[in-house]
Amino acid sequence: MSLKNKLMEDMKTSMKNKDTLRKNTITMIRASIKQKEVDERIELDDKDIIDIISKQLKEKKNVIEEFEKGGRQDLVEQTEKEIEILLEYLPEQLTEEEIEEIVKEVIEEVDAKSVKDMGIIMKNVMPKIKGRADGGVVNKIVRKYLK
């Protein structure tokens, strides 16, 4: 079943179960998919949908920090639940150890020596982990190995 069909089925289920948060989160994903399809006049495949969900996940993680600064614990909790729902539609996330292994391999492949090689490393690492790890975590790990 394609990701688009799975989203549709899950939305129907959440409506039947009166799970408003899940329904709203899935609606948000589907709206982004539809928007991109209309703007670019294309049919998105699962890879493109994963990119959209990853982008939304990153936005949700950033907004949590703002809610915490504002003392809005209710919104923090709601956003964390939305993140859990988004993660269900992404490939299994890599652990930091798995990311470190990929980063080490790429550093050896491109023969990186310093932080100046950061762009080359990120350019080679990101396609390998697409949708399975946050770029910020990857960036932190790369910096750990390049001094």
Image (cartoon, rainbow, N blue to C red):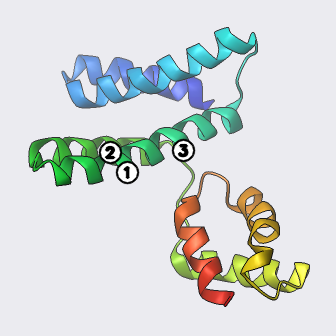
Where disc 1 sits, the SS reads helix
Rendered residue at 62%/33% (across/down): 49
Find residue 54 and name its label.
3
Image quadrant where residue 119 sits: bottom right
> To which residue does mark 2 refer?
63
**Amino acid on which disc 2 is placed:** Val
The mark nearer the N terminus, 1 or 3, is: 3
Q: Image point 44% across, 48% down: which residue?
A: 87
Residue drawn 44% across the image and 22% down it = 9
* Residue 1 seen in this snapshot: no
Kind of residue at disc 1:
Lys
Amino acid type of the residue tagged 3 in the rendering:
Ser
Apparent side of residue 130 relative to residue 113 in the rendered image (left or right)? left
Residue count near mark 2 (Cα–Cα under 10 Å), binned few <14, some 14–19, many ≥20: some
Above or below 63: residue 123: below
* Disc number lying in front (1 or 3): 1
What is the C-alpha distance between the residues marked 1 and 2?
A: 6 Å
Alpha carbons under labels 1 and 3: distance apart: 11 Å
137 horizontally vs 60: left or right: right
Q: Which mark is drawn over residue 61?
A: 1
Look at the image and tell me in which quarter the N terminus lies: top right
Answer yes or no: do the residues labelled 1 and 3 have beta carbons within 8 Å? no
Residue 105 shows up from this direction: yes
Q: Position of residue 141 (x, y in %)?
A: 58, 79
- Of marks 2 and 3, which one's residue comes earlier in the chain? 3
Say if mark 1 contacts mark 2, CB within 8 Å: yes
Callout 2: helix, strand or loop? Answer: helix
Residue found at x 80% / y 76% = 117
